[in-house]
């Protein structure tokens, strides 16, 4: 019982204190929000170690048991160790791991960045396949989705500017028509999030303790 | 039968088509003509009207992720500056953007046979964000003692007549993040510096209020903006080529949407008849 | 001209309002556009030297000195450079202090009280009369059971993909509730439930959630810790990893829940390519269109958050949804009145009566 | 043709192709890139977190700082250390304490910020219609916008069945929502294609040297 009560009490107290300090600029309260963020990132640092540990163990197990595809676990280890070790060496040697010419910087520029940008760039293909499949005039709602998407897509390229009306229509859709629902959705999410926060502070929502 | 196939085209064919239409314009240097928008035109005019020998400061506030959109802008603006015999001062607020900016600057400078230290300079990166911006308002040399390669600024003739923002004709911020807001808020308002922003397409919409309020004198948005600027400078570059790829990619997507819908309707009608 | 200028200019120094102390604002009153430079110097009243602090802004004609000690008195000297002359003005002594309440945040306080009032009130009502609360059905929620059912029938695993936000994000917490529901459904069958995590703390919480759900249906032996996967704290690395897992494990149902960024469509398209039924839910407004296009069911924005209360079917939880509904109603009425008021004020203003317009502007400033 | 001789460019180019091979189907090359990506990614974020967060926010103030307040930093260390209770079978409930603090602080920070940053901004943006009377088009458009906000909010109103007037308004709301989704989908396509162009330019220019 205590194992649930204590965390609930802690959530309540931290939550209430942080909300109140929002209205009090006087020290030590005014700075508390910033302090909370610093603490947050420190605790995150510890939690990170749990994640790293979990991954290292997962791949270790795969190698130890010769599970299917265990060879790729060596690739994982190689990547991790290379980045971790060069990072620490570069930081100590140059004072900044990202300084020009450090080995860490090479890994970043020629391995991590290309991998990131290529993964990101897969989207060019996926927007195409998703729109081919999803934008069918099955019913009125789907038709609205389809038509606006096509108009805006046309409005963004030079050919669109040659079709009379497309450019102003695109601008109008972006500046007015889509702004209303975008605002409504954001207000809804904010209210829902606030009520979720209240539920958490009051200890009503407690899935996270399950 | 054919219609059924067309409603369920294997997505790998779509990938193939997209890949090809994006690739071909790049390989064969195809271009499309673009319509110039007011905000890009005004950016162009502001730089074009600067007297010969004025200094333009360009801030590289992006890294590799936004390079496809912002690098063509950088090159187009550099070409414009060098063509008009303006001096260029490059600075960086994203440490990871330093090599990217340097690469663009050197490439264009070589095209125009410009001399380092006389016609252009690369100051590199100094940590401190807003503090750096503000201190440059008093004395640039007191923030950047040396250039990127470590030469003292006093030894480079380009910096002889440049002390602070008063000696900078226009500041061009090429932005992939929040640095543009800082330029406007701190340097624009406090030092009355004229600012042009070049931003990624996704960010462009948010910048219009600044344009309307006169806080920036020009706005170049995304690859399309870069292509427009290239058109104005009359030296086609990757922006215009990219715009061709864009156009064909958009049209391909729309083409597939149309095929999907036609086959969908044909099949539905057949289904009804049965 | 010069005399006029000197007569009309003055410098004010005052404690910067509504802050935690340590700051003094210096303002030049009566200036117009022709200031070249304005230097602010400070003297700590211990000796006679004035040290340069900074420059007066050329638009707001203010300088905020953030380096003041609370309670200590300072003198300020301001040197104003014009095209043809320089003017020196003094002001002080002045000291900085901290305030106990920030009046600029009163509007937040009022809304917070009203809104919390609604929520608390409805929670109370729900406790007293649990039957009396109506909350409409959310279609995508029923689909959860259906998707899990179909996936397990085919003997395929079920995937639960967390978004990129941490445990404090409302969307993540809603995702955990949905995960709870999914896992208690899957637990009844012998097919695996694979949960991918971006954040290690969310992973810990997910693991607990799933374990608990399995225990409740008496199938704790089916729970396999290995299926709660941590990938990496790197956006596209996570994407690459989840994509690889999906292709290899070939899930029958995929849940994408939490806060997503650009990777949303990469994940959803891969999930679709393996033929899984996909149910997405996110509070990331920008990614909703992509989920709508690529998934079978989508919990749109607030629906995700409401869904977590709906699943529990606990009256107090539903009470809070109702409370937030009334918050919405309040805001709609507020906007409605605001628009009508603004319209009348503008019309009157055009006709030369600016009282309402001024009142309106004051109010908007306060908000 | 001016193919690159830089081994690093080759590595980057091959990794790019490995990822793209996934578009065809899963294969060992993609698996290689995927595992390398996760490995490098974890190493990278760990190093980053250590040097951007732990060192400047914890180590430096504790070791080099002078403020007496710095000893409060021991608290987050202790809380953070509780995270490791996850490895204990008996006391693993202790992990709930850092999670509870996390959630308490997160909720406490979110409530006022959501009001100020999200709700007020959106409400203000909807009411403030200074330019509404400048022209008919702007006035009409502002009304369209206003209806969009209200109808969308009605769609998210859960306390009433979607029937009658509420149902009709909610239906209008979903029309608006779909239009917004279509527009933002269409709008994003360009940025996504730009990314692909960037990768192709890398392959053709930096690696193969086919184009200038």
Image (tube, coloured by chain):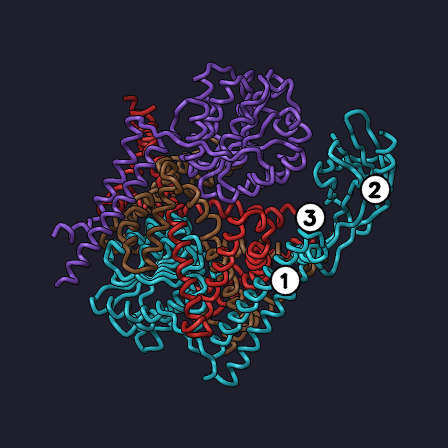
Query: Which hue belongs to chain A?
Result: brown
Q: Chain of mark 3?
A: D
Quarter of the image where one finds residue C359 = bottom right
Q: CA distance from mark 2 to mark 3?
A: 24 Å
Q: Nearer the viewer, residue B197 or B152?
A: B197
Labelled disc at residue C44: 2
Labelled disc at residue C108: 1
Labelled disc at residue C20: none
Residue A52 at x, y percent in the picture: 41, 53
Quarter of the image where one finds residue D124 = bottom right
Query: Which hue belongs to chain D?
Result: red
The residue at 58%/60% (across/down) is D115
Labelled disc at residue D66: 3
The residue at 34%/59% (across/down) is A141
Name the secondary structure under disc 3. Answer: loop
The residue at 27%/31% (across/down) is B24
Q: Which chain is cyan?
A: C
Q: From the viewer's perspective, is A173 left or right of D35?
A: right
Q: Are marks 1 and 2 on the same chain?
A: yes
């Amino acid at each position: 019982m205590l194992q649930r009560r204590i965390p609930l009490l802690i959530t309540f107290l931290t939550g209430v204190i942080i909300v109140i300090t929002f209205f009090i600029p006087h020290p030590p309260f005014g700075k508390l929000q910033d302090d909370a963020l610093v603490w947050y990132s420190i605790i995150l640092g510890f939690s990170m170690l749990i994640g790293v540990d979990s991954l290292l163990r997962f791949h270790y197990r795969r190698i130890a048991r010769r599970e299917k595809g265990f060879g790729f676990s060596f690739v994982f280890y190689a990547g991790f160790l290379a980045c971790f070790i060069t990072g620490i060496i570069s930081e100590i040697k140059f004072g900044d791991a990202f300084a020009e010419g450090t080995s860490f910087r090479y890994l970043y520029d020629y391995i991590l960045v290309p991998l990131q940008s290529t993964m990101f760039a897969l989207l060019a293909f996926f927007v195409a396949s998703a729109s081919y499949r999803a934008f069918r005039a099955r019913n009125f709602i789907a038709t609205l989705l389809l038509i606006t998407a096509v108009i805006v897509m046309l409005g963004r390229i030079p050919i669109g500017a040659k079709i009379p009306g497309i450019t102003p229509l695109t601008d109008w859709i972006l500046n007015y028509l889509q702004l209303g629902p975008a605002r409504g959705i954001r207000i809804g999410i904010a209210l829902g999030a606030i009520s979720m926060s209240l539920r958490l502070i009051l200890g009503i929502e407690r899935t996270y303790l399950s | 039968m054919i219609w059924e196939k067309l409603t369920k085209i294997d997505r790998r064919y779509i990938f193939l088509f997209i890949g090809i239409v994006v690739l071909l314009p790049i390989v064969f240097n195809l271009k499309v003509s673009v319509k110039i928008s007011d905000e890009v035109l005004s950016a162009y005019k502001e730089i074009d009207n600067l007297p010969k020998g004025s200094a333009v400061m360009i801030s590289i506030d992006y890294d590799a992720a936004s390079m496809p959109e912002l690098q063509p802008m950088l090159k187009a603006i550099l070409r414009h500056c060098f063509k008009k015999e303006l001096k260029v001062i490059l600075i960086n607020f994203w440490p990871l953007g330093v090599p990217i900016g340097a690469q663009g600057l050197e490439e264009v400078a070589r095209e125009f046979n410009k001399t380092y230290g006389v016609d252009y300079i690369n100051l590199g990166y100094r940590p401190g964000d807003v503090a750096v911006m503000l201190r440059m308002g008093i004395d640039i040399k007191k923030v950047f003692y040396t250039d990127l390669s470590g030469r003292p600024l006093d030894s480079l003739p380009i910096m002889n007549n440049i002390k602070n923002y008063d000696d900078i004709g226009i500041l061009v911020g090429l932005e992939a993040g929040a640095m543009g807001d800082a330029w406007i808020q701190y340097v624009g308002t406090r030092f009355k510096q004229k600012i042009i922003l070049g931003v990624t397409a996704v960010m462009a919409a948010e910048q219009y209020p600044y344009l309307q309020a006169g806080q920036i004198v020009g706005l170049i948005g995304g690859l399309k903006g870069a292509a427009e600027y290239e058109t104005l400078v009359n030296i086609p570059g990757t922006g215009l080529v990219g715009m061709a790829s864009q156009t064909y990619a958009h049209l391909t997507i729309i083409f597939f949407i149309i095929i999907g819908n036609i086959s969908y309707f044909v099949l539905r009608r057949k289904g009804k008849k049965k | 001209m010069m005399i006029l200028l000197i007569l009309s200019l003055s410098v004010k120094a005052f404690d910067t309002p509504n802050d935690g102390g340590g700051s003094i604002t210096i303002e030049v009153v009566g200036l117009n556009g022709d200031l070249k430079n304005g230097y602010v110097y400070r003297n700590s009243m211990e000796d006679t030297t004035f040290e340069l602090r900074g420059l007066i802004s050329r638009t707001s004609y203010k300088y905020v000195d953030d380096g003041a000690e609370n309670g200590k008195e300072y003198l300020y000297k301001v040197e104003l450079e014009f095209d043809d002359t320089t003017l020196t003005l003094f002001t002080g002594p002045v000291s900085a202090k901290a305030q106990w309440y920030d009046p600029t945040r009163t509007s937040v306080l009022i809304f917070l009280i009203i809104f919390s009032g609604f929520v608390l009130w409805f929670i109370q009502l729900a406790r007293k009369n649990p039957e009396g609360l109506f909350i409409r059905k959310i279609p995508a929620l029923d689909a959860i059971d259906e998707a899990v059912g179909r996936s397990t029938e085919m003997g395929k695993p079920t995937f639960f993909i967390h978004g990129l936000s941490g445990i404090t994000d409302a969307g993540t917490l809603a995702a955990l509730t949905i995960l709870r529901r999914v896992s208690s459904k899957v637990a009844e069958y012998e097919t695996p439930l694979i949960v991918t995590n971006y954040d290690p703390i969310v992973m810990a919480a997910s693991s607990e959630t799933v374990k608990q759900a399995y225990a409740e249906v008496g199938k704790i032996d089916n729970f396999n810790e290995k299926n709660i996967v941590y990938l990496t704290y790197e956006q596209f690395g996570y994407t690459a990893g989840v994509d690889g897992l999906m292709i290899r494990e070939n899930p029958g149902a995929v849940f994408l829940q939490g806060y997503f960024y650009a990777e949303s469509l990469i994940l959803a398209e891969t999930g679709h390519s393996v033929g899984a039924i996909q149910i997405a839910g996110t509070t990331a407004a920008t990614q909703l269109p992509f989920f709508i296009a690529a998934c079978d069911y989508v919990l749109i924005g607030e629906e995700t958050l409401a869904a977590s209360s709906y699943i529990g079917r606990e009256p107090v939880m539903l009470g809070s949804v109702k409370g937030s509904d009334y918050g919405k109603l309040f805001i709609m009425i507020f906007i409605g009145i605001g628009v009508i008021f603004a319209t009348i004020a503008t019309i009157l203003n055009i006709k030369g009566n600016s009282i309402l317009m001024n009142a309106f502007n004051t109010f908007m400033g306060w908000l | 043709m001016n193919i690159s001789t830089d081994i690093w460019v080759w590595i980057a180019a091959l990794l790019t192709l490995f990822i793209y091979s996934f578009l065809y189907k899963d294969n060992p090359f993609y698996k290689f890139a995927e595992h390398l990506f996760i490995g490098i990614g974890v190493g990278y974020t760990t190093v980053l977190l250590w040097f951007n967060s732990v060192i400047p926010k914890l180590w430096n103030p504790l070791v080099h700082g002078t403020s007496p307040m710095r000893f409060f930093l021991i608290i987050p260390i202790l809380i953070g250390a509780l995270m490791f209770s996850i490895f204990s079978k008996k006391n693993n409930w202790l992990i709930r304490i850092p999670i509870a603090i996390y959630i308490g602080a997160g909720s406490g920070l979110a409530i006022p910020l959501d009001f100020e940053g999200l709700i007020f901004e959106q409400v203000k943006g909807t009411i403030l219609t200074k330019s509404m009377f400048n022209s008919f088009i702007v006035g009409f458009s502002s009304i369209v916008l206003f209806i969009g906000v209200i109808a969308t909010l009605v769609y998210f109103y859960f306390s009433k069945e979607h029937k009658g007037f509420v149902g009709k308004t909610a239906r209008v709301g979903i029309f608006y929502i779909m239009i917004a989704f279509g527009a933002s989908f269409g709008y994003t396509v360009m940025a996504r294609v730009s990314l692909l162009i960037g990768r192709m330019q890398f392959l053709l220019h930096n690696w193969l040297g086919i184009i200038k």
